[in-house]
Image: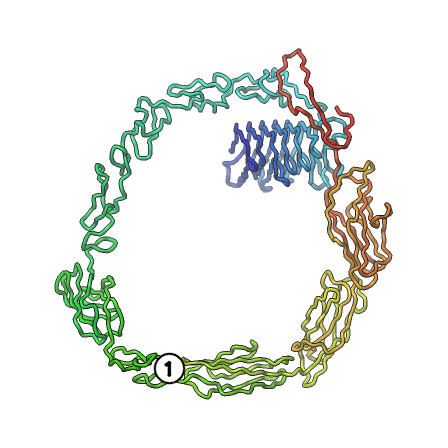
């Protein structure tokens, strides 16, 4: 069960109460009901309750008042009930005995939603909705299975009190309600159902209440301590409860916090050990008032501060020390001395204030007596090796298997003492390396002590006297720097030079093109790379062989650029390949042709003149919209059996109209050699093609006129004849030429190219409407267009303001009191028969 009970919500702009409760009926038995009772919401908006497969939902005896909500498209309150149709038990929801007063919201005040299943039953009963304002209406009844009965509905500032958007032939129970009046004309003006919109469901309205007054005589008129909210039912003022509001109630004192009894309106008599107006102060005098180190939470019961413990909070928590119970330091490898607060380390391996550092001669994460190298003497020697190096450090165990590692090269070592090992430097390239030792030749130290090897070659060897040098000396031998090589780096390598190729070459269309590139000099290995050229062109990167299978023609020569390189240098060559065009295509027919009434596919065909061998070849067909200049390129192939002929199809765009020209050309040519063929396409448009209409029905005869709503434009190059006009989606409606009298036009005999016809929309016998209608223009040949109109028609009703809007006064039975009330009509529409 979920319960929201006896709360006050104030100044919450949106989502003051938002519940999403989903129960899985086949295994979840914990959430059987939701109860929201006796709460007050002021200056707060957005009550949203969504339940799914919940047995029972109740929203009762709540007060919602004096709230202005700025969510334009939302309702003040929405309740949704749904569930699995495969479940076999009934569910219900009820909103009863609630007060909705002086609320302003964008769309509606209350929205009821459920699914069309007989397993869900809803009731909206005994509620008061008064002096509230919503744009669309007070109650949006979109619940197939909800009864809206015995409610007070008096909201003259809202368009209607109850409306729906449910579609179908079913009906909703909306009976026994007070509508601010009891005559049929007034009641029908306060609803929107099938009577106004034929596709909506029907409201069953009768019988209705003839008065908004409630009778509470059987409950002593609430004993003058509450309000009569329905017949013989009271809503008691604060401090009182019971059927007649005669019992004391201490909700305002939080029910004495369960530590006393209610002896008067919000007045408590506290139990032993408790004191204060609300009985929420406990006494701990027998436990030294928690010794100043805690809080008294119950009589003689302390809640100690974080560092203290004991019944009177006089002792320290573990790992705390001293009279103030200060926290001990975080001793990593030791214990806290509770007298001094200092760390005492576990072993001599550890040191530092937190026992987290190694003592002298101990190393590593566990502070162990590890083998450690601290220094080597000497720090340098010849690259040919053989000299003695002394390693000094700590924890060297006695062993006959010592090894020394210079960089990655291992040499023999000799143990001398716990802090001294002698190493022999190995042969090593010139440079700086690390020196590490190992007692067993397997596990080496990692102390990063450095040793420098320097070269032993003669000063002028390896071309080191040149600038830049030709090489370097390693182990008494030369390592040459390119382009030099040889024993003493005296021979120079050559970069590649490409043998000259023809600057311009000619190839035949659709034949294979090849060219072998060569060098006049250059040492191997070399690599050939294509820098510029078509993707179809290939180059062997080792041999320099160029090839192109079935080369196509192009009006401009192809440019080819090739690069060759080796370790020393590089070279580049560029040449052109000209491939003359060997055929010319021509367009000679379209089907259909002439003037087309509406967009449809057009078959385009033509022939080809060859200057060489006939074969199946590609053709580019260009279709141009003369009005917009837009071009559509169609790729076609000539027939395999008859290569002199080709055909393709143009599929039009939805907005095509006017003159269209078509030509054919060779894919490699941008010029057009043949003549063009044309066709025309009729077209018309509404300018604009979509409008929004929001009008108020002011005329006594219900006529609404929208001036210059749109214009019909001939967007093509030819006259359009016999254009019929019809309005779809609304009756007794027509259009007229802008500026004419109320003379409908049903047909336009001829519409010349680039000519606009401006028109008005006239609606007779108008009634409230919200939806979409269309004006359709169409010829007998199929040329068509339409104007989409999103329309909203509403009726302006009188809006009355009453000051003051509420009166609260105690009147002794059998006496009379008179009050001055000012009633003002806030709009220009006259109100008659005011009751």
Q: Is residue 145 above or below residue 736?
A: above
Q: In this view, does 142 lie above or below 654?
A: above
User: 347 left or right of 223?
Assistant: left
Q: Position of residue 468 (x, y in %)?
A: 34, 79
> Which corner quadrant holds the C terminus?
top right
User: 582 left or right of 36?
Assistant: right
Q: What element carries label 1?
A: loop
560 or 143: nearer the viewer: 560
Q: Quadrant of residue 122?
A: top right
Q: In this view, does 536 lie above or below 95?
A: below
Q: Position of residue 489 (x, y in %)?
A: 32, 83
Residue extending farthest left: 416
Q: In which quarter of the image is residue 191?
A: top right
Residue 176 seen in this snapshot: no
240 or 745: nearer the viewer: 745
10 Å crowding of disc 1: few (<14), some (14-19), many (20+)? some
359 or 456: nearer the viewer: 456
Task: Please give the name of the residue rendered at 72% of the width and 24% of the height, measured from the top-left corner.
Answer: 210
Q: Position of residue 460 (x, y in %)?
A: 27, 82
What residue is disc 1 on?
483
Task: Please give the name of the residue rendered at 68% of the width and 30% of the height, measured from the top-left corner.
Answer: 155
User: 336 left or right of 67?
Assistant: left
Task: Please give the name of the residue rendered at 74% of the width and 53% of the height, measured from the top-left corner.
Answer: 689
Residue 403 seen in this snapshot: yes
Q: How many marks?
A: 1
Q: Where is residue 9 in the image (x, y as percent from the top left)?
A: 54, 31
Rendered image coloring scheme: rainbow
């Amino acid at each position: 069960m979920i319960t929201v009970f006896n709360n006050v919500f104030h100044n919450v702009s949106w989502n003051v109460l938002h519940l999403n409760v989903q129960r899985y009926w086949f295994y979840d038995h914990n959430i059987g009901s939701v109860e929201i009772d006796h709460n007050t919401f002021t200056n707060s908006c957005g009550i949203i309750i969504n339940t799914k497969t919940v047995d029972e939902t109740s929203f009762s005896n709540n007060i919602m008042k004096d709230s202005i909500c700025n969510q334009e498209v939302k309702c003040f309150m929405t309740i949704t009930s749904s569930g699995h149709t495969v479940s076999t038990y009934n569910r219900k929801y009820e909103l009863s005995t609630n007060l909705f007063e002086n609320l302003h919201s964008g769309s509606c005040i209350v929205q009821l939603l459920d699914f069309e299943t007989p397993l869900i039953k809803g009731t909206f009963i005994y509620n008061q909705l008064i002096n509230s304002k919503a744009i669309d209406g007070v109650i949006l009844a979109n619940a197939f299975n909800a009864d809206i009965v015995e409610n007070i509905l008096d909201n003259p500032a809202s368009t209607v009190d109850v409306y729906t958007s449910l579609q179908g032939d079913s009906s909703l129970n909306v009976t026994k309600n007070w509508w601010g009046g009891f005559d049929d004309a007034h009641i029908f003006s306060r609803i929107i159902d099938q009577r106004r919109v034929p596709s909506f469901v029907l409201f069953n309205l009768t019988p209705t209440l003839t008065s908004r007054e409630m009778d509470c005589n059987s409950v002593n008129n609430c004993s003058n301590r509450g309000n009569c909210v329905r017949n013989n039912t009271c809503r008691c003022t604060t401090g009182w409860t019971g059927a007649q509001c005669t019992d004391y109630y201490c909700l305002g004192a939080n029910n004495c916090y369960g530590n006393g009894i209610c002896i008067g309106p919000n007045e408590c008599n506290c139990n032993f050990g408790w004191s204060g107006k609300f009985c929420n102060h406990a006494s701990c005098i027998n436990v030294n008032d928690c010794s100043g180190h805690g809080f008294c939470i119950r009589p003689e019961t302390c809640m100690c501060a974080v560092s203290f413990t004991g019944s009177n909070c006089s002792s320290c928590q573990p790992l705390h020390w001293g009279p103030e119970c200060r926290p001990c330091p975080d001793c990593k490898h030791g214990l806290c001395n509770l007298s001094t607060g200092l760390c005492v380390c576990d072993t001599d391996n550890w040191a530092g204030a937190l026992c987290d550092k190694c003592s002298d001669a101990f190393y590593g994460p566990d502070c162990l007596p590890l083998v450690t190298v601290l220094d080597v003497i000497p720090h340098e020697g010849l690259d040919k090796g053989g000299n003695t190096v002394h390693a000094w450090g700590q924890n060297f165990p006695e062993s006959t298997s010592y090894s020394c590692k210079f960089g990655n090269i291992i040499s023999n070592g000799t143990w001398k003492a716990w802090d001294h090992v002698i190493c022999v430097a190995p042969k090593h390239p010139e440079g700086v390396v690390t020196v590490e030792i190992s007692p067993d030749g397997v596990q080496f130290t990692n102390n990063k002590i450095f040793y420098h090897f320097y070269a032993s070659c003669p000063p002028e060897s390896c071309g080191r006297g040149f600038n830049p040098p030709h090489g370097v000396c390693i182990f008494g031998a030369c390592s040459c720097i390119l382009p030099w090589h040889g024993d003493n780096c005296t021979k120079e390598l050559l970069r590649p030079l490409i043998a000259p190729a023809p600057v311009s070459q000619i190839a035949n269309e659709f034949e294979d093109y090849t060219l072998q590139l060569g060098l006049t000099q250059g040492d191997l290995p070399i690599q050939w790379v294509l820098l510029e050229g078509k993707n179809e062109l290939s180059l062997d990167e080792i041999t320099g062989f160029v090839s192109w299978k079935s080369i196509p023609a192009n009006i401009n020569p192809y440019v080819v650029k090739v690069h060759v390189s080796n370790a020393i240098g590089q070279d580049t060559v560029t040449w052109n390949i000209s491939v003359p065009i060997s055929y010319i295509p021509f367009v000679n027919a379209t089907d259909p042709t002439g003037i087309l009434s509406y967009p449809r596919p057009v078959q385009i065909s033509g022939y080809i003149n060859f200057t060489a061998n006939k074969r199946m070849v590609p053709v580019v067909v260009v279709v141009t919209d003369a009005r917009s200049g837009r071009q559509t390129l169609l790729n076609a192939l000539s027939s395999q059996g008859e290569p002199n002929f080709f055909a393709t199809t143009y599929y039009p765009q939805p907005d095509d109209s006017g003159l269209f020209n078509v030509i054919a050309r060779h894919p490699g040519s941008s010029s057009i050699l043949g003549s063009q063929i044309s066709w025309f396409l009729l077209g018309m448009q509404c300018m604009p093609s979509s409008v929004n209409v929001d009008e108020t029905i002011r005329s006594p005869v219900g006529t609404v006129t929208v001036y210059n709503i749109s214009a019909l434009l001939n967007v093509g190059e030819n006259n359009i004849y016999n254009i019929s006009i019809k309005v779809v989606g609304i009756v007794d409606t027509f259009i007229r030429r802008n500026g004419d009298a109320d003379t409908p036009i049903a047909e336009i005999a001829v519409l010349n190219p680039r000519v606009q016809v401006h028109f008005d929309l006239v609606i007779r016998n108008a009634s409230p409407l919200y939806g979409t209608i269309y004006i359709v223009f169409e010829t007998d040949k199929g040329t068509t267009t339409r104007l989409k109109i999103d329309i909203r028609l509403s009726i302006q009703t009188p809006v009355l303001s009453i000051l003051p809007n509420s009166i609260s006064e105690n009147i002794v039975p059998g006496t009379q009191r008179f009050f001055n009330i000012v009633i003002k009509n806030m709009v220009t529409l006259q109100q008659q028969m005011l009751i």
